[in-house]
Amino acid sequence: MKKTFIARNPSALWFLAALAIFTILVTVLSESVGAGIISTSFLKTLGKTLCLCLVAIAMDVVWGYCGILSLGHFAFFGIGGYAIGMWLMYARTEGIVVTSLQSNPLPSTPQEITDAIGTQIFGVVGSSEFPALWAFSQSLPLQLLAVVLVPGLLALVFGWLAFRSRVTGVYLSILTQAMTLALSLYFFQNDTGLRGNNGLSGLQNIPGLEDRSQATVSLWFFWASAAALAMGYILFAYVVSGKFGSVIRAIRDNEARVRFLGYHVEHYKLFVFTITAMVAGIAGALYYPQAGIINPAEIAPIASIYLAVWVAIGGRGRLYGAVIGATVVSLLSSWFTGGSAPNINLGFYEIRWTDWWLVLLGVSFVLVTLFLPKGIGGLFDALVRKPDVDRQGDYGPDKGAWRDEEGAPE
């Protein structure tokens, strides 16, 4: 009898229930509609953390389940942020320009408005012309499509070239890292219109919602992030279950044997690589309006390495493990680097956590790798794992033996 989706993925139901309770609790305690215990800034931190959990799940699927150690998935995350950021910059600047030009004795032409918008956006890099990359920045539907399609197309092309050449292991990781570095350097260039190192700023000011408080807008983004995480979890839980999930796990464990059995390994890997890139783009599009700014440093190779560290600490090969890792590291990072963690004065030296956080993260990664190879999620497995059957013999007919339990006597 074929098992249902919930029967194959019992953790999905528990995760969705925990996420729903968490969302309701945060809403009740928020400044916008609740008791005001959770500040707007911390609410944004929680919303951003949910987005990081979503991209961590995508990373876990491509690495923990399929065995592709991608050091470029945060680049897809950044592309999603830039895609929505361009529309936010254009629409917000358009509103400011139109309001300022209303005082002119003669009505402004559309070209004059466009030129003024270009001057406002690109003046910081000494330009006023709209680059080709901004061709559809005035259209929200097209930019939303770009959030999904651009990361997906880039992953499809890159994956097709890499997988058809059967590049695997550390060589594939180096290629994904090179792709990320090239993309980051490209975004630094002024002729892209992405304002170089200045990046796109003021993204927290959503056009059309100027009459709403930041507390309300932040709560809406928190809800959207929670909904995206829930749908992403269900999607990937479905992907990694059943026959498809068994095949990609087999590819992770022994790619040559799976290919020998007649499976098109490249097709499976390409599908996983592409769909996870698209979800990463969606996560980035929700993250950066809450962060308020995006620049090329956000998609530097080191960011993708951090993403792999989160998954490893949480426990790769477990969707909830990726969520745990991203949540723990993200919140601890905000606490240590935000100045909330008290410095420790040793007399001869003062430990400032803003300087030592990366060292602490690196040490934690090494310790988890050595002493907790299954990550934090592995602790949950140990709590809910069924005890092993006290088998009598190997394949004998006695009760408790493999043959007896599997119901396949010969």
Image (cartoon, rainbow, N blue to C red):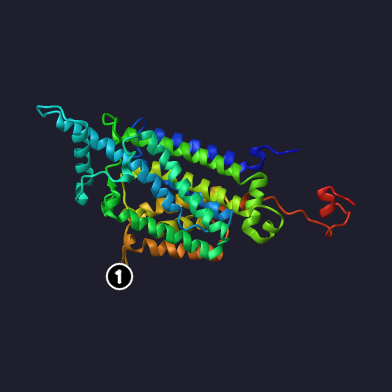
Q: Quadrant of residue 179?
A: bottom left
| Other residues around mark 1 within 10 Å, as few (<14) / some (14–19) / many (≥20) | few
What kind of element bears circle 1? loop
Residue 8: x and y, percent?
A: 66, 42
Query: How many marks on residues?
Result: 1
**Residue at image point 70% right, 39% down:** 3
Frontmost residue, 270 versus 376: 270
- Is residue 203 found left or right of 328 in the rendered image? left
Frontmost residue, 97 versus 226: 97
Name above or below for residue 76 compared with residue 139.
below
Q: Is there any visible trace of residue 29 in the rendered image?
A: no
Frontmost residue, 269 versus 344: 269
Residue 269: x and y, percent?
A: 58, 52
Q: Quadrant of the N terminus?
A: top right
**Residue at image point 46% right, 50% down:** 154
Farthest-out residue, left: 105
Q: Amino acid at mark 1?
A: Tyr
**Residue at image point 40% right, 33% down:** 28
Residue 187: x and y, percent?
A: 33, 53
Residue 202: x and y, percent?
A: 27, 42
